[in-house]
Amino acid sequence: MTDYTKIDFESLAALSGDEVVTHSYVRDVPLSGGKTLALVTLDNGRDHTRPNTLGPVSLLEYAKTLDAQAARAAEGEIHAVAITGKPFILAAGADLSKIAEIPDRETARKMGQLGHYALGKASQLGVPSFVFINGLALGGGLEIGLNADYRTVDASVPAVALPEVFLGLIPGWGGATLLPNLIGIENALKVVVENPLKQNRTLKGKDVLELGIADVMFDSVNFLEDSIAWADGVLSGRIKVKRPNEPGKIERLAKWDAAIGIATKMLKSRIGSVPESPYAALELMKAAKNGDRAAGFEREDEVLSRLIAGDQLQASIYAFNLVQKRAKRPAGAPDKALAKKVTKVGVLGAGYMASQLATLFVRRLRVPVVITDIDQARVDKGVAYINEEIDKLLGKGRISSDEANRLKALVTGTTDKADFADCDWVIEAVFEELEIKQNVFAEVEPHLSPEAVLATNTSSLSVEQIGAKLAHPERLVGFHFFTPVAAMPLIEVVKTPHTDEATLSTAMVAAKNLKKNAVITADTPGFVVNRLLAVLLGEAMRAVDEGTPFETVDEAIAPLGLPMAPSVLLDLVGLKVGAHVLDTHHEAFPDRFYRSENLHKLAEYGKLLDKDDKGKVKGFDKGALKIFAGGKNPRSAEDILVTLQDGLAREVHLMLEDGVVAAAEDIDLCMILGAGFPFQMGGLTPYLDRVGASERVFGDSFHHPLITGVGL
């Protein structure tokens, strides 16, 4: 096994000349009965806006500090060591920018080994070690705690997580080995794999306690004092720590491998096989069942070195920077000061999509929301749906019963458009047909104040044409959500030639208040996401019409790493909707977008996939396959993929030339947040550069130099 004490880590420190060092400060805390606790506080000297991070210099100082405490413990000067962070922050893990700059695999291996060397010292002190999780604890920050003997957590911590898989890495400083042996394999799978792939979901203090990551939870007011007193109780023997989720022999023998197998199968169905890090994490966690810490750490070093040196980390960091930086500063957004206040929302429609929108608006904005439809029965059904969604939030503990009652009281339904008179934001979500949308706006506009903003949730129709019958088209903006509304983080904000700056500013501020990321697009068919998905669906249907089996088409497009195959996407959006999307784009750009008559026949037939009673796909429906039986020119998966890559490159290039969005980065942001394009692929345009499609189509690349990661 690797002896970390014999490795020269100073070469890593030389790579970190501008590292913001997180220092390890020590003070002694006297305990009852004459014992002493050495309290180590991590602090980078910045305020809470700059979290503690763990670069090489910080890790070496931390290791040296713990070595000093081990020596003191051997002399009997101290009886325990506790580690905590500056106010509200333990640590946000490694500095990603530094990891991305690591030049080779051997240096990458050393980085993993340094983390094990430094953090592992908490288990080698000769006295009990405690970590007081007082705030943000991500990645290596949480692994500081996992390497200790005991943990407490502040009830109000904003986020605790191991997000590495989300970024193309694995929890490589002990997380993949220690966590499953602390809280059981199924709980660990949730933290290491499931949560990162659900838009990087994090844990709150209560979750940390219930999972068994922390042994006890205290309120913020006296968190440090209570944690120290609790540690004193553990040292004296007055407090016995029980961990009900720690795996026993039965779990290791019977449940462990089965849980890994189920997780692997689920991952392949959800994300395909392109992303490397989730599967690497599963292999590490599978091997961790023997409980051998040293062997587990060595496996983590090997896997981490491979992932750091690979393409997917660079791609992930590019995508991460898009979401963390560009999404926070949307290109082309007007001054926020121009935005109008939204004090009441009107929703035109009471169907499924409209009800989802109403639920989101009332939950996030906490303002009155009124919905309408063509008759009272539809309105009542919509209000009932919204109330059910609020009850679900209550049942999951996301809101209190008082909040649930307040939210329900804010929702009303009506068939009288005059009840919209005091709305200052009105959004339509009716059937995707131009005349219907025009008419509902024309009907409600006379009841509204001149200041009210109108928004349309159209997915592909011209926003300008939707507003053709309006007296004030300058106050209309596209506001395109993605399904499911609550979960999908993107809104395409569509600016028409008439949309004024105040309306656009109001839309951008509203998106932010809804906790969504907004990208401004021009008013063009399909905007960004649906236009590019129409390229994909068009190429898929062309291949099927020519005689290529659906299975081959799905296989061909799998290397893009999209969350679902074309056949599943068609089934999800609906066959009629899919046909409509292709028709819309074919009408606008007949030379570039394919129209499938067979898809219309399939839509009339009404079924593509054969499913069991629980909705699980068993295969393709035999009747559906007969519709496509006449094709005589089947194509190979390789040919389909190259054709699709070139089609996407051509369309993106044209979109940028036409000013649909400000830059290639905005295309990538839309595809990541709206289409589930995987972080590990680094955005669509870097992918098209890497596979040569950009060069093939227009003799250049979207990014210079031609790399996976691009500065913003």
Image: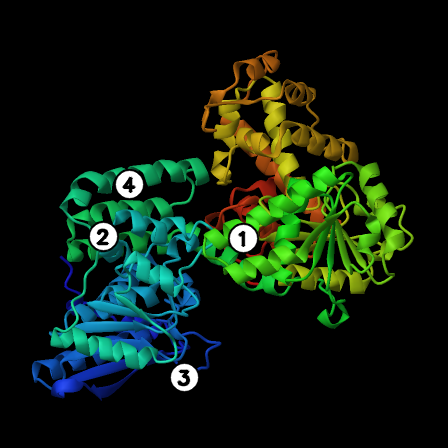
Residue at numbered disc 4: 259
Q: Residues under labels 2 and 4: Cα distance?
A: 20 Å
- Mark 4 element type: helix
Q: Tell me the kind of residue under disc 4.
A: Ala
Residue at numbered disc 3: 45
- Indicate which disc, 3 or 2, sits on the residue closer to the N terminus: 3
Rendered location of residue 645, percent (x, y): 58, 37
Q: Please say if the residues under marks 1 and 3 sit with CB atoms less than 8 Å apart.
A: no
Q: Residues under labels 1 and 4: Cα distance?
A: 41 Å
Q: Please say if the residues under marks 3 and 2 sit with CB atoms less than 8 Å apart.
A: no
Residue at numbered disc 2: 299
Asked whether 648 or 347 is in front, the reply is: 347
- Indicate which disc, 2 or 4, sits on the residue closer to the N terminus: 4
Asked whether 118 or 178 is in front, the reply is: 178
- Mark 1 vs mark 4, foreground winner is 4
- Indicate which disc, 1 or 4, sits on the residue closer to the N terminus: 4
Q: Residue at x 31, y 56 (%)?
A: 105
- Mark 3 element type: loop
Label 3 neighbour load within 10 Å: few <14, some 14-19, many 20+? some
Rendered location of residue 554, percent (x, y): 51, 29
Q: Residues under labels 1 and 3: Cα distance?
A: 38 Å
Q: Tell me the kind of residue under disc 3.
A: Gly
Q: Quadrant of the N terminus?
A: bottom left
- Mark 3 vs mark 4, foreground winner is 4
Q: Residues under labels 2 and 1: Cα distance?
A: 33 Å
Q: Residue at x 65, y 23 (%)?
A: 603
In the displayed structure, would residue 711 be above or below residue 593? below
- Indicate which disc, 2 or 1, sits on the residue closer to the N terminus: 2
Q: Which mark is residue 706?
A: 1
